[in-house]
Amino acid sequence: MAENAMPIEPTGPDIAAFVVRLAAGDESALREAYRQHHASVRAFANRFLNEREAAEDLVHEVFVALPRALRGFRQEAPLRQFLLSMAVNHARHHLRAAQRRRRAQQRLAREPETAAVTPERMAERRQLARSLAAALDELPVPQRAAFVLCELEERPAAEVARIVGTSEGNVRVRLHNARRTLRQLLAAWHPAPKEDRT
């Protein structure tokens, strides 16, 4: 197998046996599940939380909780989808912690800088990144999950509905509301410059 090749998830009777081993806490099965799926869970966690430390904590928590969670797994969905669903369900307290750390960083950023002045373009980019993170922080968790999964991870609404446990219509409504709120917040924080009519 090539170094970067993704292992193929078992199917049919093989996945049933694999899930039984996972639910029993079999270490080799857990290592295999982690090897197959940690990149997807980590990518979602990074996008959802906007903070690497919190994302790593969330990934760890999901895989630690996997054996117990699998007792309710009926195999209607792929294991990766089930893991993303777990990540959404476990994300709330990690999100609050990440928000607190970002607020602390924003307070520090408002302090006068003693170092050399940063070029204007870099300062604008940093401000925009902070604004996007802050705007995401204003969204309710269901809207944030819909936005991250649909917009940033480019997953279809039907798949997102299965991940978060709701209807496709609800996902579309949440996504619409999230987009509207983000547009309003970013417009309020960064109004378009007025045209010079002189």
Image: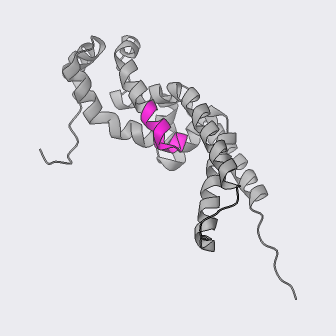
Look at 64% across and 66% down and name the residue there.
124
Q: Quadrant of the N terminus?
A: top left
Segment tinted magenta in the rendering = 45-57
Look at 65% across and 43% down and name the residue there.
104
Residue 155 coordinates in the image, percent (x, y):
46, 43
- Relative depth, front residue between 105 and 178: 105
Residue 98 coordinates in the image, percent (x, y):
57, 37
* Quadrant in the rendering for residue 191: bottom right
Instruction: Residue at the far front: name it.
Output: 114
Secondary structure that dominates the magenta span: helix
Residue 122 coordinates in the image, percent (x, y):
58, 68
Instruction: Residue at the far right: name it.
Output: 198
* Quadrant in the rendering for residue 24: top left
- Relative depth, front residue between 82 and 34: 34
Look at 62% across and 66% down and name the residue there.
123
Rendered image coloring scheme: one colour
Look at 27% across and 28% down and name the residue there.
33
Residue 166 coordinates in the image, percent (x, y):
56, 26
Question: Would residue 22 appear left or right of 80 to someone viewing this image?
Answer: left
Question: Would residue 197 appear left or right of 148 to someone viewing this image?
Answer: right
**In the image, is residue 121 part of the stretch drawn in magenta?**
no
Instruction: Residue at the far left: name it.
Output: 1
**In the image, is residue 56 part of the stretch drawn in magenta?**
yes
